[in-house]
Amino acid sequence: MLPQMQREFAQRHFTPQRYERFRQRLEQELGCRIEFRICEAPIFVSDAFRRQLEQIAVELTCACATPEYRAYSEEAVPPQYRVPGEPERPLFAVVDFAIVEDSSGALQPRVVELQGFPSLFGYQYFYARLAREVYELGEQWSYTLGGLSDEAYLQLLRRAILGDCAPEEVVLLEYRPWQQKTLPDFLALRRLIGIEPVDVCELRKQGKRLYRRRGDAWVPVRRIFHRVVMEELEQAGVELPFEWTEELEVEWVGHPSWYFRMSKFALPYLKHPAVPPSWRLSELATLPERLEEYVLKPLFSFAGRGVVLHPTREQVEQLPPQERRHYLLQQRLRYAPCIYTPVGMNTVELRVMLIWLAEWEQPLPVMAMARTGRAELHGVGYNTMPWAGSSGCLFAPAAAGEHSGEP
């Protein structure tokens, strides 16, 4: 991390007028209002720390694609969501890191959670590019990972999402996409690679094919960029025009099974120095003595829903025995106040976003995002104060002569 650059940004590059111009440019480029709070500052990261984040994210993603882990995680996929054609590895993965201090006072990344599911691959590209431009930070600061240029990053997105299809044959599938807070990302991807957001409830099934309306016609869907969160469908009691378990003539871009497999479900399995001790609640014979030093999390919820930061013994014991296998008890991470702002020191979470094409031996980190603030939870819904919220990463220059574009 680069605290001196965070201070320099606040004192030399930031003005309220530039921030307002940055926000306006971002909304103009994406063509919609952004409903979550946009942080005033990007997060500046050193080359060495970037490398550390990338390495850990690759190691953990690979660990989730072993035959041993796939056997372990079979029970993670509910029967009603066993979509045919599951690949042996996730196409998309993200790993979230809390930045903490170790015993020597050095800053270290520790895993909060991970997902075999896409993230904001489009929005973060626009955020970081415009932050660098509007705040006049200089092109020496990069915002892609994996040594990718802008063009290489966009080409990789097209390869991963479109495959050999035309954009009109691919849909970004979500539940009520125009009402989601992630709409800016959907519109960013529409601008970058030409795919349209489509409501999962508005598809039509004929035989083994799915169709979506385009103008006055129904056109076949060949590939689905899967952004549907199953939890939302269940909460809304949605009836779909197809069953997830059906054999359909469609390619899933980001197979739904990996939403369940590579998730908080994986944390007790992963024995890695960056992963804090974690257990499924059903596997604990006795609860830890100092329960306040742990966090209770539902396995498959998003955006901090259902997380209990300071669980009591009574809260845990009130969970029905049959429900405990759906909860994780994780040692609580103490976030370091390491991000300077004019109104106080912030803590931060960094997300590494990876793509893993079928022909590659390992995944490639391609983009990052950040969430920063002074609240206990880091979802942007919790950090609504000034100098907090959704952010992006700018990375210091790599060593001379180094470049890579694929694993």
Image (spheres, rainbow, N blue to C red):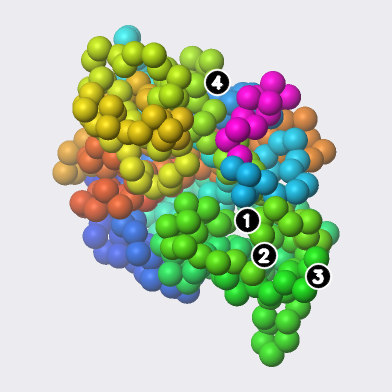
Q: What stretch is highlighted in magenta?
A: 66-77
Q: Is residue 135 left or right of residue 315?
A: right
Q: Name the residue under label 2.
A: 242
Amino acid residing under circle 3: Gly
Q: Which of marks 1 and 3 is nearer the N terminus?
A: 3
Q: Which of marks 1 and 2 is nearer the N terminus?
A: 1
Q: Mark 4 points at which residue?
A: 269
Q: Earlier in the sequence, mark 1 or mark 4?
A: 1
Whether the magenta-drawn stretch holds residue 49 is answered as: no
Magenta-highlighted stretch: main secondary structure? helix
Amino acid residing under circle 2: Phe
Q: Which residue is drawn at 60% across and 74% down?
A: 202
Q: Mark 3 points at which residue?
A: 207
Query: In terms of depth relative to the viewer, which is nearer, 321 or 114?
Result: 321
Q: Which residue is drawn at 28% across and 27% down?
A: 317
- The reply to whether dot 1 and dot 3 touch (C-beta < 8 Å) is no
